[in-house]
Amino acid sequence: MGEEEGAAGHGEAGPRQGVKSGTPKFSVSMDSHEAYFNALSREEVQLIALRDILYDGCWDEMVRDLVARKEGKPFVYKLQTRLEEDLQRIEKLCSYETENGVNLGAYVQYANLAKGPGNE
């Protein structure tokens, strides 16, 4: 890990100490992936959490399960929203993760999942 990487190893500097006063100065900026995550709907965040919990982080397995449900075959879980909408959400989230080399599941706070992002 380089000197400029933060403790979490995500390339972000941690809180910085003021040069003269010794007072901690905290950066108020967030990385672009966190900003993207915070703009997601509650349903999208739930899909990310379900992917990580039920499908070991694999979108493909989750999509197979939704398609099986759509075709009347056995499936793992039941969502409260329409299948087509969820499949579109998954495509959007999967594309973002693939294009940016990021796991949005890293931003999910499972204890607050029921509230959704930004609804504390």
Image (spheres, rainbow, N blue to C red):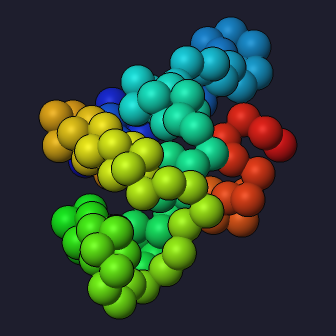
Relative height, residue 34 to residue 89 (above, below): above
| Picture quadrant of residue 72 | bottom left
Residue occupying the point 62% across, 57% down? 109
Q: Is residue 8 visible?
A: no
How many labels sit on residues?
0
**Residue at 27% of width from left, 45% of height from top?**
91
Residue 26 at x, y percent in the picture: 65, 23
Q: Is residue 16 left or right of residue 33?
A: right
Image quarter of the C terminus: top right
Q: Residue at x 42, y 85 (%)?
A: 76
| Residue nearer the viewer, 89 or 36 | 89
Q: Nearer the viewer, residue 77 or 14?
A: 77
24 up-or-down from 42: above or below: above
Tell me the residue at 50%/26% (across/down).
Answer: 35
Residue 95 location in percent, x, y? 22, 39
Is there any visible trace of residue 95 in the rendered image?
Answer: yes
- Residue situated furthest right in the rendering: 120
Q: Position of residue 69 (x, y in %)?
A: 36, 75
x, y percentage for residue 23? 76, 21
**Quadrant in which residue 93 is drawn:** top left
- Quarter residue 83 falls in: bottom left
Residue furthest out toward the top: 20
